[in-house]
Amino acid sequence: MNIRQLFLGDEPNQEVCVRGWVRTFRANRFIALNDGSCLANMQCVVDFEQIPEDVLAEINTGAAVEITGNLVESQGKGQKFEIRARNVIILGTSNPDEYPIQPKKHSLEFLREKAHLRIRTNTFAAVMRVRATLSFAVHQYFTQNGFYQVHTPIITGSDAEGAGEMFRVTTKNPEQADDKPDFFGKETNLTVSGQLEAETYAMGLGKVYTFGPTFRAENSNTSRHLAEFWMIEPEVAFSDLNDNMDLAEDFIKSVLAYVLEHCKEDLSFLNQRFAQEEAKKPQIERSSMGLLERLQFVTQNEFKRVSYTEAVDILRNSKPNKKKKFKYSVDGWGIDLQSEHERYLVEKHFTCPVIIFDYPAEIKAFYMRMNDDGKTVRAMDVLFPGVGEIVGGSQREERLDKLVERMKAMDIHEKELWWYTDLRRFGTAEHAGFGLGFERLVLYATGMSNIRDVIPYPRTPLSAEF
Ligand code: ATP
Ligand code: MN
């Protein structure tokens, strides 16, 4: 049995055997043992007279041990049970002078360099358990709502956005000039989105979603961008932008409610951590709510929906604070919103998640459905406090002539996407979908502030260790 099961159970006075890693060993008597199954350590009390000295000498922070003994009700405060250790077996030693994870608070930056061991800290173990639970909640939500998961290709011959920023996949040796064709006989890249392929499947299975890795060689070294991240992309046939916004809102609320219910211990730990971090910030930058409070708030309140045009009007008539203006001024209709604008709308103006829809066609991708005004497309972004854009989606252009017109205007080669335009030739129908960056959702759920700390091995510019 693992430690979590022992704590959940109600049966003291039985002989148990647990295996885990020593967090601390105090007074030659108290081992705080953690096996990763839950946040809480199991306190194991050893009778040092009964344990051989050479064994005692190896009970160090980081060592793997097996402990057998009686599970008893704990006298100590804050814990239900402890183990009276009868026998301790050292499974794997750990030199305390070399083990980098000391029983003290390490900086997140330091821990990023020890990404193979940081999972043995309370913070990372809590974050990764929440991440795993959220992932389960995603599959559960879609399955219960009649969606089928599709596994879209990771190596693709197409670029969904028609923009650069891709990682080339090739078997050609750059040092050698050879004129043999490349492996696939054409240029291929790691996928930036499974959307176009998901669309084809929605037009056969009705409701589908993808949940897979996505790669973008964007050189933006921010706390919100990774070069490799996981994206969730539902796509629904016979649905429009309003349905799409409803789906995004219901989906996010449901999965957050799921972790609130199933990750109580970890979230309450992260809640405390969040409060400590917020307290270090200057007053005006602090979040008005605690982590748990804001998760509850999001699950219980409606997201605010405004059109791009309304959003620009709000921004033009506002000053972010008394002295400063925006770094990027909001000159007029048609600008791409910067993250300072998005944050202002979400954190200062509406103080809740916001969905902005009907963006100017010029700043959005070719596949988004043109509105009757000929200027805006049926796009939507969901913006979250602290995280910024968490979802980007749209109703897709289902009219062949309009789609081809847009492809021409945006220099997207129709020949390469012949299969995509085919969908508009055979049984075309209204359809819509969105992409949600899984790590941004985990960031929000855990209250962490850097996306590098919510994925096991972050891939960012100049960094691919491990
Ligand atoms: P941003 O403006 O934040 O760079 P984007 O508009 O390029 O994002 P989309 O192409 O709309 O992103 O992708 C859909 C979602 O994927 C985004 O809403 C976001 O949650 C997530 N996402 C995009 N780029 C990244 C990245 N580099 N790292 C992590 N998540 C990302
Ligand atoms: Mn986007």
Image (cartoon, rainbow, N blue to C red):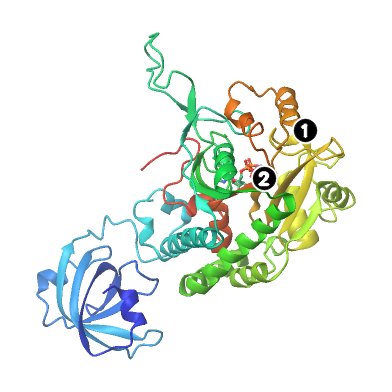
Residue 343: % across, % down: 72, 53
- Marking on residue 362: 1
Name the spot of residue 306 as percent of width and height, x first: 81, 54
Q: Which residue is situated farthest in the right direction here?
A: 317
Q: Quadrant of the N terminus?
A: bottom left
Q: Report the amino acid beneath label 1.
A: Glu
Give 406 or 380, whichever is nearer the viewer.
406
Tag 2 or tag 1, which sits nearer the N-term?
1
- Residue 60: name its quadrant: bottom left
Q: Residue at x 53, y 69 (%)?
A: 258
Determine whether 92 is above or below 257 in the image: above
Judge by depth and name the residue closer to the eye, 100 or 436.
436
Give the residue displayed 67% in from the left and 65% down from the top.
Answer: 287
The answer, for residue 385, to whether it is visible in the render is no
In this orientation, does residue 374 appear?
yes
- For label 1, the SS is helix
Above or below for 175 versus 347: above
- Give the residue drawn at x 52%, y 74%: 261
Q: Of circles 1 and 2, which is in front? A: 2
Mark 2 = which residue? 431
Residue 203 point in image, percent of width and height: 59, 42
